[in-house]
Structures are given as C-alpha cells and as structure tokens.
Image (cartoon, rainbow, N blue to C red):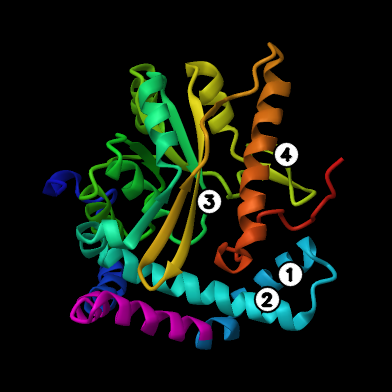
C-alpha cells in the first residue's frame, strides 16, 4: 500500500470527495454479493442504460466508419454488448483480490509458453494489449507466470479514486509509475536491466505515428516501437477476452522483435503497423468487447494510403 505522503498524485479537493464517497459506497455494497452475481447485475445495467447515453452515438459512428455496410440492428446489438462488458469492469477492479485468489478458475491462459520464452530469452519485454474484455487481467496472467512488470499509467482525474485503484493494482505485484519525466526515467532503467513493461496501445495519441487501423489513418503511440528498437526488446501481443461473469481468457502470442532495417522511421512505421494489425484482428473477433467510445480516428477520418 502506498504511504500517505505519496498516496495522492494531487491534493484532494472537496469535489473529489463528493465523487469518491458514492463510488466507495457502491463498491462496498456490491462486494457483499458473490462476484458472479455482482458482475451480471452490472452487465444488465450496462445493456439497459448504456445505449441510451449520448456516448453511444460516437460508438455507432465509429462502427459505421469501420463497417459501412453493417446493418443497424447489428450495430445496436454490438453497442449493447459493449456496454455490458464495460459496465462490468469496475466490479472486476474492486473484486481483484477475489479474482486473484481464484485465478486458476477465473483466468484461462492460452500461450503461456510464450511468456516462458520471453523469460528465457533474457531480453526486455514490451507486452501490449488493448481495451478489450478487461485488460487488467493481462497483468495478472503475466504475474501468474512469474513475469515482473513495470507499468506506466495516466492517473485518474480524481486523486481519491486513483489512489484506490492503484492500491488494488499494486496488490497484483506490479510496479506502477506515473506518466511523465520520472516515469520515463524509471521505465528506461527497467528495460536497460532486461525487465518488462505492459502497454495499452489502442488509444489516439496526437504526437504519435499515423498508422493504418481498419484501413483508416489513426494517430498511434510510437513508444512500443521506439523502445523495442532502442533496448532490443521483444514485443508480446496479449489479448484479453471476457468469457463469463468475472471469467477471462488471456491469449499470449509469440514474442517478436521490432522491424530493424536501419531506417528508423520506416522501421517504427512497419512495427506499429503490425501492432495495429494484431489489435484489429482481436476487435474483429470480438467487436462487442472493444471500447468504441473514443475518437480513435480523430474528427476527420482519412483512408490509409
């Protein structure tokens, strides 16, 4: 548990307590229920209320952008499924201790031999994933196979909620470092020493690389490619799926190095094109479990060249 001086990334204000207290009460209430029942309850709430929220309009626009010929009824079904999945995520977090305690039954690992191969290689590893299923399970799966992880994170806006979530995550045995100069310095130390990190790379980053995603240009984080090239790290795709209430499948794919031809710009683009292709395949397989709510392609989408 973090000590009091470093517990909050900023000093909490009164409005933060107004947000935190109701969330804390809900978490404590539903922790009294069996995990599966609580998960199904939140899934039902998500399916009922989520499609009515204004954010669903963006999800519908994104799906229509990717699949222009998809029938409206199918888009509606996928949006309901998306809300079902993401409404369950908070319940997963405040029950992480129970999921970890019952991990052999709740987390199925496919491709565990690839984690062993990474460990045996002696090279640093960059495990990457996407906002599918519940991505937190990827870190638990790695720890189940004795893979140490240092994770750079962006804090929640509410420092009280942030402190609580980070406490739950740290109990999985991972090192959390806040995004910024100090975080970058620490990650450099880890990779230089042959350690491993975990990244979610399906988000828009305005200062990243323009890389095709579903055939549309998408500003994509360049860090996985840049770090893999600089530290001779292996890139490890890790896919997470929800296969039941508080039950997950984590699929680890074979590690591979970044493309390295000596042309750094071309190598980074080729590497991140491969990374995006892996995530694209995961989304195609389980589209209802991906986060369609953000502007992955910006306000003006452009077809890939």
Residue at x 28%, y 51% (from the top left corner)? 10
Left or right of residue 28: residue 254: right
Residue at x 73%, y 22% (from the top left corner)? 266
Residue on which disc 1 sits: 61
Residue on which disc 2 sits: 57
The label on residue 210 is 4
Q: CA distance from mark 2 to mark 3?
A: 21 Å
Question: Furthest residue to the top?
Answer: 262
Q: CA distance from mark 3 to mark 4?
A: 18 Å
Q: CA distance from mark 1 to mark 2?
A: 6 Å
Dot placed on the residue nearer the N-terminal end, 4 or 1: 1
Q: Work out whether residue 1 or residue 145 is closer to the camera in this orientation and state it.
A: 145
Residue at x 78%, y 50% (from the top left corner)? 216
Position of residue 123 relative to residue 95, above or below, is above
Position of residue 228 relative to residue 157, above or below, is above
Residue on which disc 3 sits: 130
Left or right of residue 247: residue 269: right
Q: Are marks 1 and 2 in contact (CB under 8 Å)?
A: yes
Question: Which of the 4 image quadrants contains residue 25?
Answer: bottom left
Residue at x 37%, y 51% (from the top left corner)? 155
Residue 206 in view, yes or no: no
The segment highlighted magenta reads 26-47
Q: Residues within 10 Å of mark 4 (few under 14, many from 20)?
A: many
Q: Are marks 2 and 4 in contact (CB under 8 Å)?
A: no
Residue 259 in view, yes or no: yes
Position of residue 177 relative to residue 76, above or below, is above
Dot placed on the residue nearer the N-terminal end, 2 or 4: 2
Secondary structure under the numbered disc 3 in the rendered image = loop
């Amino acid at each position: 548990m973090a000590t009091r001086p470093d517990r909050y990334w900023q000093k909490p204000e009164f409005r933060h307590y107004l947000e935190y207290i109701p969330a804390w009460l809900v978490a404590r209430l539903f922790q009294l229920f069996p995990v599966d029942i609580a998960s199904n309850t939140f899934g039902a709430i998500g399916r009922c209320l989520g499609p009515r929220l204004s954010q669903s309009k963006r999800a519908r626009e994104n799906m229509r952008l990717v699949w222009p010929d998809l029938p409206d009824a199918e888009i509606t079904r996928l949006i309901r499924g998306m809300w079902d999945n993401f409404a369950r995520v908070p319940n997963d977090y405040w029950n992480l201790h129970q999921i970890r305690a019952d991990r052999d039954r709740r987390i199925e690992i496919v491709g565990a031999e690839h984690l062993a191969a990474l460990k045996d290689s002696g090279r640093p590893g960059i495990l990457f994933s996407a906002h599918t299923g519940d991505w937190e399970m990827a870190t638990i799966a790695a720890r189940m196979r004795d893979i140490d992880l240092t994770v750079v994170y962006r804090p929640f806006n509410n420092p009280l909620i942030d402190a609580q979530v980070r406490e739950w995550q740290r109990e999985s045995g991972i090192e959390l470092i806040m995004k910024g100069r100090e975080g970058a310095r620490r990650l450099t130390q880890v990779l230089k020493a042959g350690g491993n990190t975990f990244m979610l790379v399906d988000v828009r980053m305005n200062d990243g690389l323009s890389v095709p995603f579903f055939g549309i240009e998408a500003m994509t984080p360049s860090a996985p490619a840049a770090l893999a090239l600089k530290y001779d790290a292996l890139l490890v795709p890790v896919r997470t799926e929800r296969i039941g209430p508080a039950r997950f499948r984590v699929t680890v794919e074979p590690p591979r190095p970044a493309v390295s031809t000596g042309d750094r710009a071309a190598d980074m683009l080729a590497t991140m094109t491969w990374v995006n292709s892996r995530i694209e395949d995961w989304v195609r397989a389980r589209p209802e479990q991906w986060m369609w709510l953000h502007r992955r392609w910006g306000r003006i989408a452009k077809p890939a060249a």
